[in-house]
Image (cartoon, grey):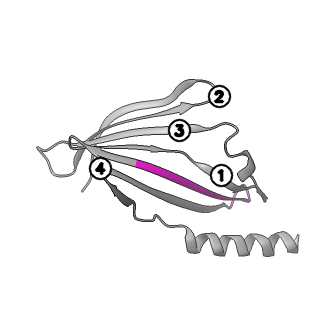
Amino acid sequence: MIKHMIVGATAITLAACAAEEAAAIDLGAGLSVGATTDASYDIDAENMNLMITPELGYSAWGADFSVDMDINIYDQEEFVLGDAFDKPVINFGVEYPIGMVEGLTAYGETSYDWDASDTVGSKIGVKFSF
């Protein structure tokens, strides 16, 4: 029990140091790459999780297109990186600013489940940021 607590505390500390969004690297011609790491601990479920989300972006015609995938590295006291590509779900998105009002953006999102060969969670909408 103590060993798990020490390992968990160390992993949380290291992950918290790295758990922030890195600025995307501009590759030119509208392409960019970046990644987000997310380290979290669910207090109720007593579950620690470390996830990385690499993202590829493309800007054209005033819209921002993105493709990303969540890769689980650590979950429920074990490393699961080896299982990351067993059931991949790829997320696609596009955002387009609506020029009439500052902060108004139209968007569309969908995810593709590679195993099911089907899209899941598709939605379109408008959001306002201020």
The amino acid type found where label 2 is placed reads Asp
As drawn, is 30 to the left or to the right of 82? left
To which residue does mark 3 refer? 90
Q: Which mark is residue 72?
A: 1
Residue 40 lies in quadrant: bottom right
Q: Would residue 67 appear left or right of 39 to someone viewing this image?
A: left
- Highlighted range, magenta: 43-56
Rounded to the nearest angstrom, the CA distance separating label 1 from label 2 is 17 Å
Q: Which residue is mark 4?
A: 30
For label 2, count other residues whose C-alpha is less than 10 Å away and answer few (under 14), some (14-19) or many (20+). Answer: few
- 114 up-or-down from 52: above or below: above
Looking at the picture, which amino acid does disc 1 mark?
Asn
Q: Determine if the magenta segment contains residue 64.
A: no
Specify the amino acid type for callout 4.
Gly
The type of residue carrying mark 3 is Ile
Q: CA distance from mark 2 to mark 3?
A: 11 Å
Q: Which residue does the image show at 57% across and 75% down from the upper left?
A: 17
Under circle 1, the secondary element is strand
Residue 61 on image: x %, y %: 21, 40
